Amino acid sequence: MRSPAISMVSPSITQASPGSAYDSEEKLLGVGVKSIFHTDYRELLSLGMDVLAKEGMIPTKFLRRDGAEIDVEIWIRELDSPDSKVFLIEARDITVHLKTAKALRSREQRLEGITNTVADGIVTIDSDGAVQSFNAAAEEIFGLSSEEVIGHNICELVPGSDGSEP
């Protein structure tokens, strides 16, 4: 199946990737849609644009002409056209968002590893006093599991902390 060609490009695409191989509208015009999809995602196109247009948001990867990968979310819509089927592909670059999310998950895992290996009991609470985390040492100290404590108010854990007892 021949890949449909790009026949129109929004000027914003060149503003979004200055200095890339697709830094002008002309460099994208006539390019087969399949060629901008990462090889791992090209099979999506075999479903047909009609099917993809019904999917809503689709996470995928595009390739720049220089081979650089771009993580994107795409939306495909069929446009009214009397002559032939015309589809609009709207793409949003989420590369930075995904890298940031991955770094945040990594940081959280590191902190969780530290928290769970220290000898001191560590209990974290939010501004309302609800327990957010309860490490293994805290489980030993209080004789309660984290599942029993997380989500409950700290006042339930520490007698007299609600001001009712001296």
Image (tube, grey):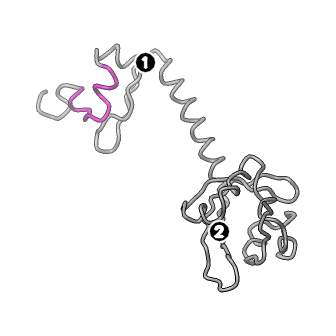
User: Residue 158: horizontal and vertical position, in percent?
Assistant: 23, 26
Element at label 2 = strand
Identify which amino acid the numbered label 1 is placed on: Asp
Q: Which residue is mark 1?
A: 120
Vertical position of residue 57 compared to residue 16: above or below: above
Query: How many neighbours does mark 2 have within 10 angstroms: few (below 14), some (14-19), or many (20 or more)?
Result: few
Q: CA distance from mark 2 to mark 1?
A: 51 Å
Tell whether label 1 touches label 2 (CB within 8 Å).
no
Q: Quadrant of the C terminus?
A: top left
**What is the x, y in percent for residue 83?**
70, 84
Does 32 appear above or below 62?
Answer: below
Q: Number of labelled discs?
A: 2
The residue at the point 66 percent across, 73 percent down is 87
Lower position in the chain sequence, tag 2 or tag 1: 2
Residues 67 and 125: in front is 67
Identify the residue under disc 2.
90
**For the point 26% across and 34% down, which residue is it?**
152
Q: Nearer the viewer, residue 153 or 61?
A: 61
Res. 135 image quadrant = top left
Magenta stretch: give its range. 145-157
Quick one: SS at disc 1?
loop
